[in-house]
Amino acid sequence: MRGHAVSFDNGLGFSRAFWQAIMESGYQCAGCGEWNSVIVDESAGRQQSYVEDCQICCKPNVLRAHYDATSQEFFITAELE
């Protein structure tokens, strides 16, 4: 479950700091096992927990995102709510 920095076109009126504060990552649904892409807002902290519905089966997953400073990526674990 590796996160990757996202490159966005800044022509939408958002500041550069906004785009630098988010990262694309992913998780495997705890219900159906399918991979889901998510955007993690770095400004919310290096350890986060929130609920996100699977994009395939719609089951709610409790996501726990942890930022690894060495790899500069978010790692996400999921369990059913």
Image (tube, rainbow, N blue to C red):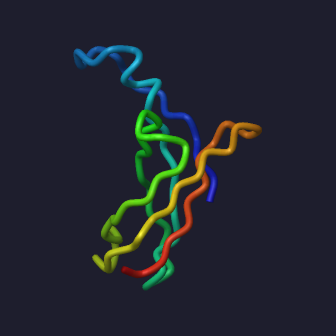
| Residue for point 41% across, 70% down | 62
Q: What quarter of the picture does the N terminus occupy?
A: bottom right
Q: How many marks?
A: 0
Instruction: Tell me where residue 47 appears, x and y as whole percent.
Output: 53, 50
Q: Is residue 16 left or right of residue 58?
A: right
For this view, does 66 lie left or right of residue 68? left
Quadrant in which the C terminus is drawn: bottom left
* Residue at x 44%, y 29% (from the top left corner): 21
Query: Which residue is nearer to you in this view: 5 or 62?
Result: 62
Residue 66, compared with residue 11, is above or below; it is below
The vertical placement of 3 against 18, above or below, is below
23 to 57, vertically: above or below: above
Residue under the point 56% across and 67% down = 77
Q: Position of residue 7 (x, y in %)?
A: 48, 27
User: Is residue 50 shown above or below 31?
Assistant: above
Instruction: Please indicate whether residue 68 sits to the left or right of residue 20 in the image.
Output: right
- Describe residue 58's horizontal placement relative to residue 17 as left or right: left
Residue 17 placed where, x, y %?
41, 17
Looking at this view, name the residue that lies furthest to the left: 13
Q: Residue furthest right?
A: 70
- Which residue appears at 44% of the width and 84% of the height? 32
**Residue extending furthest toward the bottom:** 31
